Image (cartoon, rainbow, N blue to C red):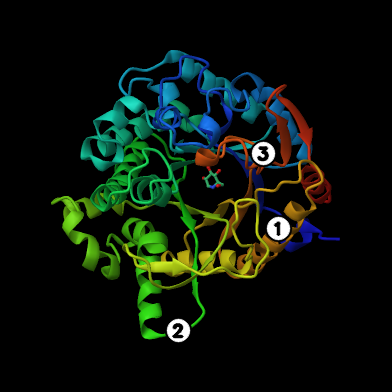
Amino acid sequence: MFDIRSKFSDDFVFGVATAAYQIEGSKFGGCGESIWDHFAKNGGTANGDDGSLACDHFHRFEEDLDLLVDAGFDAYRFSFSWSRLFPDGKNLNTKGLDFYKQLLDAINSRGLRPYGTAYHWDMPQALGALGGWTIRDNAERFGEYMGFIARNFGDDLENLVSINEPWCVAWLSHYLGEHAPGLRDLSSAVKASHYVCLGHGLGVQAARAETEKPIGVVLNFTPGRLETKTKINTEALERYEAVTNTWYLSAIIKGNYPDVALQELEGYLPNSWKSDLQNIKEPIDFIGINYYTTVLLKSGGDKFPFVEIIERDLPKTDMGWDVEPAGLRDAINLVSDYAPNLPLYITENGMASKNAIADIDRIEYYKQHLNEVAKAAETLPVNGYFAWSLLDNFEWALGYDKRFGLVHVDYETQKRTMKDSFKWWQRELAKK
Ligand code: NOJ
């Protein structure tokens, strides 16, 4: 028996996480075209899949929230769609405003605690067409948008996150080309890596003026490992860490970028970068950690940061990601080294599995990772854990092929079926 309740303090928060574009259905309610609709239309996703229907959560949110209550979760992490609220990037869609008001009422009336994220990747395409995250203007637009979220929804939220996974917004999307807008350009990636931080800082300032609720950011961590610690491998690992795991953390908490990264990238930063850091390091109240995997590295490859990933003989998820639970504790330790005493949440953790309903592998994954969180929480302020994700959903560039849900979704009929992992959580959380 796992006995989750005995491993965590009574006030530890258990929740599930989702994101607007992955579940809502962007064709409903006057939502505008986002950079993800545009990317999907232009061949960026598996099978041409997009989020136009997704899980039809727009119409089924009551039923979906009932599932959360049924499982016994305390909290729900969801995101606001920028494109639903401001379809053309400028003018408010009142239907979008109504939708999130209704959603928040439905969350709060069920006694669930709402953790809202202002940006989980669905920027209006109108702003994407102007240059997306590579231009300063859009960082400023994001700041205003986050102020709007805090003004209109602050009272209904438990807390507010600015941006989900800035590394994905910037590096994965502008350098590795895997996410919208699908660029493979170092100069754009560095600018986006800066402006996403600036957007965060301006957003925190704008939201602070509107609400007293705690405000934070969600960062993703993929710790690197070395097999052989030669000098060149160690330097390669340092470059990898600097662009992947510490760039955003360091900027937001300390107001500087890691030296190792700056040595290569400074020339691509906009002239204002040093003075912007003042705004970027606007104090925050918590950090959310998203964790899925680690990578084994060596020096190599023909592009910055000059690392190659080495295959390991570890269990893999359906994403092909190695399962290494200890990496989650490393991520927690890294964040608390930078930000001692700042409250932390695990805002995402979970796995894609081919097992449609009998997902014993996912139960094992949760157990192993929760054990790491429990150990960390003995000495560090880790206050909650959110499983990714409530429902199978649109897994970005990989479309609907990859299933992360505790609840299976039949995309033909939209029928929801509880998986074994859902029932596992239900049994565990019931043991108060
Ligand atoms: C992190 C992202 O925030 C989420 O949107 C995504 O589905 C999961 N990783 C799994 O890849």
- Separation of marks 3 and 1 at Cα, in angstroms: 15 Å
Residue 338 percent across, percent down from the top left: 41, 66
Look at mark 2 in the image and give the residue it sits on.
229
Q: Residue furthest right?
A: 1
Secondary structure beneath dot 2 equals loop
Numbered tag placed on residue 268 in the rendering? none
The answer to whether mark 1 is within 8 Å of ligand 1 is no
Give the foreground label among 2 and 1: 2
The answer to which of marks 2 and 1 sits earlier in the sequence is 2
Look at mark 1 in the image and give the residue it sits on.
365
Classify mark 1: residues with Cα within 10 Å, few (<14), some (14-19) or many (20+): some
Q: Is residue 182 visible?
A: yes
- Separation of marks 2 and 3 at Cα, in angstroms: 40 Å
Residue at the (58%, 30%) spot, across then down: 23
Residue at the (42%, 64%) spot, across then down: 339
Residue closer to the observer: 32 or 104: 32
- Separation of marks 2 and 1 at Cα, in angstroms: 29 Å
Q: Please state which amino acid type lies under the numbered disc 2.
A: Lys
Residue 52 percent across, percent down from the top left: 53, 23
- The answer to the question of whether label 3 and label 1 lie on touching residues, with beta carbons closer than 8 A, is no
Q: Residue furthest left?
A: 271
- The answer to the question of whether label 2 and label 1 lie on touching residues, with beta carbons closer than 8 A, is no
Residue 237 percent across, percent down from the top left: 40, 73
Residue closer to the observer: 82 or 338: 82
Q: Which of the four quarters of the rendered structure image does ligand 1 lie in? A: top right
Classify mark 3: residues with Cα within 10 Å, few (<14), some (14-19) or many (20+): many
Secondary structure beneath dot 3 equals loop
Look at mark 3 in the image and give the residue it sits on.
390
The answer to whether mark 3 is within 8 Å of ligand 1 is no
Above or below, 11 relative to 122: below
